[in-house]
Amino acid sequence: MGDGRYYTYYQFFNIIILTFLTMFTVASMVMSHYRNKEIRGGKYITVTFLDITLIVIGRVFETVLPSIYVAKGLRYFESMMLIIATATFYYYLFVYMFPLYRNGSDGFYNKMKIMFLIVLIFLGINTKGTFLIESYSFFNVVYSFFYIGLLCSLLGMIVISSAVIFKSENQMHKIYTNKKIFIWITLLFTTPIFIYILALMKKSDCIDFIELFVYFIFCIAINTMSYSTTPFGLTTLAFDKIGDMIVDYVFVVDTNSNMIYKNKATNDTKFFVKNENVDVFKIKSLFRGSIEEKKNALGNTYIKLIKDNKQYYFTYKLKDLKNEDKLIGYMITITDITELMKLVYSLKERKEKAEEANKQLKNYSKVVYHLEKEKQISLLLEEIIKTREKAMEKLIIRINNLESKLGQDDFESYIEDAIKHNGDILNDVRQAVTTYREHYGG
């Protein structure tokens, strides 16, 4: 090259360390994207890794480029991104992971970050980089008091926030105690920044290695946090894999009503709202659409959802999550029973149709019965008429013969004989009617 930059042990070891750090940060960023894309606030972990990756890549180019002006511009960019990465990680820690500031606004923070970046770029161009970097050479960098002041401000915010968590009576994390959180932040976040600020103030010759040390510790801290264990004694990654195998919709909510987990089935459906706060005693608030809560014949509650002019049905279970008999959250399991309810309603419709058919068949049988009864009555009456017709003819003949016997001595015997014959006919008719009543009723 001719500029002597590759002829020192310092530069040689710097390149080696940067190479390994670049691979580490890129791998961490990729893993973080797939690991945290579904968790609440997980995008800020990925953004922090991205910022550190850009810093390390910029440092690689700064180390090998021969132009000192370009190298100084890259160092300005790295310094600017370090402030942004620290602020982003701070925002995630105390808004999402350890929710000290529950009312944090993502939109407001992102707008402020963009405005701050624009201001730093503008000031860097106007001051030719001296706004953050007082002097620069290939082997030595002196940062401005404003840059050190920004880092001190961030350090002060971190110390105050971690101290508030340490003194808080409410546990800020579902697993770790506030004391462990304070120690973790102090060792992996506060201490490296404090050492870095001391090196800046003393204008140390090893500032480059200290910065690489800070980047490396930041990556370790974020990775350690991302793969913390869950209350179930499994890694969060393993818990995700188990949850993704469940076809039901699973939500895990902490005691502060914050959504901390949703399985793949839940994320893939459009039945539920995207709220991060859940009232576990109002499960209906999870659904998107027209909701109606009902009870079946056994008294079990189910939910009817009308969405896009279609009806869906769900049941749910709410289970407490405990750690050593202490309540740490809730698990909500929602089961889609739409197909089952369709089958139930289909069977109910078929039952109603069968009952209607049976009713019509019963009415038809009554009609047939009455018709047969009337037919038998007609046949019986015809039989009575036929059998008594001859008897009546004989009675008429007897009555006619009485006229010719009028005045004779045996006239009275003829009358008694006619009356007796008539009585026999009446008795036979009464007997036929009695038999009819006994057999057919009436």
Image (spheres, helix red, strand yellow):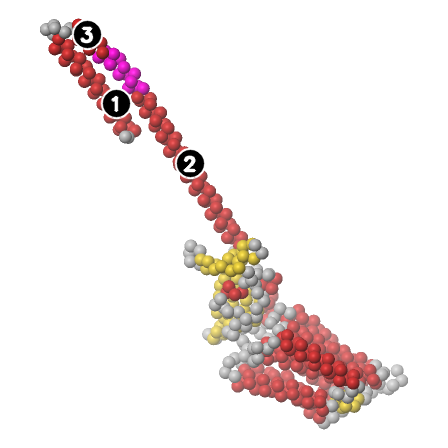
Q: Does the magenta stretch include residue 259?
A: no
Q: Identify which amino acid the numbered label 3 is placed on.
A: Asn
Q: Judge whether 168 appears above or below 424 on screen.
A: below
Q: Kindly identify which residue carries mark 1.
A: 432
Image quadrant containing the N terminus: bottom right
CA distance for labels 2 and 3: 60 Å
Specify the quadrant of the image occupied by residue 412: top left
- Left or right, 253 with respect to 418, comes to right
Q: Where is residue 13 in the image (x, y as percent from the top left)?
A: 78, 84
Magenta stretch in the rendered image:
382-395
Single out the mark in the foreground, 2 or 3: 3
Q: Is mark 3 on a helix, strand or loop?
A: helix
Q: How crowded is mark 3: few (under 14 residues within 10 Å), some or many (20 or more)?
A: some
CA distance for labels 2 and 1: 34 Å
- Left or right, 202 with respect to 238, comes to right
Q: Is mark 2 on a helix, strand or loop?
A: helix
Say whether residue 341 is visible: yes
Say whether residue 249 is visible: no
Q: Identify which amino acid the numbered label 1 is placed on.
A: Ala
**Which residue is at the front of the view, 23 or 408?**
408
Q: Circles 2 and 3: CB distance less than 8 Å?
A: no
Disc on res. 401: 3
Label total for image: 3
Q: How crowded is mark 1: few (under 14 residues within 10 Å), some or many (20 or more)?
A: some
